[in-house]
Image (cartoon, helix red, strand yellow):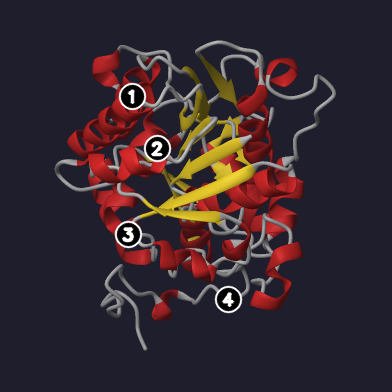
Amino acid sequence: MRVLVIGATGYIGSRTVPALVAAGHEVTAGAREPTTLDRFAWGDRVDRVELDVLDAASVDAALARGVDALVYLVHGMGGTDFRRTDRTAATTVREAVDAHRVPRIVYVSGIIPPIDEGELSEHLTSRLEVERLLSSASATVITLRAAMVLGAGSTSFELMAQLAQRLPVTIVPDWMDHEVEPIAVVDLVAVVAGALEARSGTDHFDIGGGERMPYPELIERYTRAAGTPRSQIDVPLLPQGLVATVASWLADVPSPTVTGLMESLREDMVASERRWIGELVADTYRTVSVEDAFARSLGPSVGPAAAASADPMRLQPGDHEWATAVGEVPELGGVRDASGARNPWGSD
C-alpha cells in the first residue's frame, strides 16, 4: 500500500513511519522541509515530499504522486488562531483527497468526553472540528481518539515527567481529579497500521490501554517507576490558568502546548468502548500496561547507531529538543523556558 504520512516528523509520526515500512508499505513522508527527515534513522528508507498543509499546491502535488491511504497527524497546539489553522489545514487536505480520489484517511485525534460541545476545551473542540471536516471527504475516514500517549518524547508524557522530576511535591488541584486512560505509543502505532487496512467504513474509535485511573494516581505511579516518589498535596480552588503558567516555567515543553494539555484535565479522558480490538487489530491483541510503558520509557536516550533497532518507547534522535530522557532531567535550577532562557525561578 502506498501511504502518505502527513506530520511524519512529529512524535507519533516518527514512530508510525518505520512501523509501516517494516510492514511492507511504500511510505512517503511529508514535511515542510524534507531535509528535516535526515535526523531520523528511517529517513533514507522512505520517499520524501515537500508538503505544507496550509499550501494547497504542495498538498495537491503530494497526492498527485499516487496514494492509497493518508495518515493525518497534524495538530495545532497553541497561538490565538490555532483553531483556524487546523480548519484550514483539514479543508485543504480534504479537497485534495477528493480531487485525487484517495481511498482512505486515518486521523489521530483526542478523546472527546461526553459533555456539551460548548464545554469542550479549545484544544478538543479543534480536534472535533478537524475530524468532521476530514470525515466529509469522499474517502473512508477512520478517526482514532486517544488520551495521553505514553513514551519518552511524547508531549504529554514529557510534561508529566518534567514536572514530577522538578517539583519536590506534587500539587493536585481539585479540577485535576479526573480519570485518564493512557495508551503506549507502540499500541497507538499498531492501531494506525491496522486502521489502514480495516474493513470499517468512516467511523471514529476511542482507543486506550485499558487501565483507567485519576491523574494523581498516574503521576504517583510514574514517580515510583522513576525512583523519585513524591508526596501529593491537595490544593482546592487553585486556578487552572495559574497552574498552566507555573508549569510552563518549570517544564521545557512550549507554553502554548502546556496550556492546551492542561485544559484536557478538566474532564475524564477515557475510552467509551474497546471496539478497536477486533475491528482494527486482532481480537487477541494485548496492550502494554502502564507499568511496562513506564519501564520501557525510562531508559537513557538512544544514540544514532542504535536508533534503527531501538524500542520506540525510548527517546530517540529526531525527538523534540526539549524532550529529556529520565535520568537526564535537570533539577529545578537547570530549568529553561521554551526560548532556551534560564528560568528565573530556578538557580544556577
- Above or below: residue 178 compared with residue 160: above
Q: Quadrant of residue 211?
A: top right
> Looking at numbered disc 1 in the image, what kind of residue is underneath it?
Ala
Estimate how packed mark 3 is, as few (under 14), some (14 to 19) or many (20 or more) residues with alpha carbons within 10 Å. some
> Looking at numbered disc 2 in the image, what kind of residue is underneath it?
Ala
Q: Is residue 63 left or right of residue 317?
A: left
Q: Could you say whether the residue bearing mark 2 is in a helix, strand or loop?
A: helix
Q: Which residue is labeled 3 in the image?
A: 254
> Residue at horizontal 75%, vertical 40%?
288
Q: Which residue is labeled 4 in the image?
A: 328
C-alpha span from label 2 to label 4: 44 Å
Q: Which residue is labeled 1 in the image?
A: 99
Eye-nearest disc, 4 or 3: 3
Eye-nearest disc, 2 or 4: 2
Relative to the observer, which residue lies in front, 177 or 13?
13
Q: Could you say whether the residue bearing mark 1 is in a helix, strand or loop?
A: helix
Whole-percent x, y for residue 153 in the image: 54, 59
Q: Is residue 168 visible?
A: no
Q: Which residue is labeled 2 in the image?
A: 64
Estimate how packed mark 2 is, as few (under 14), some (14 to 19) or many (20 or more) residues with alpha carbons within 10 Å. some
CB atoms at circles 2 and 4 under 8 Å apart? no
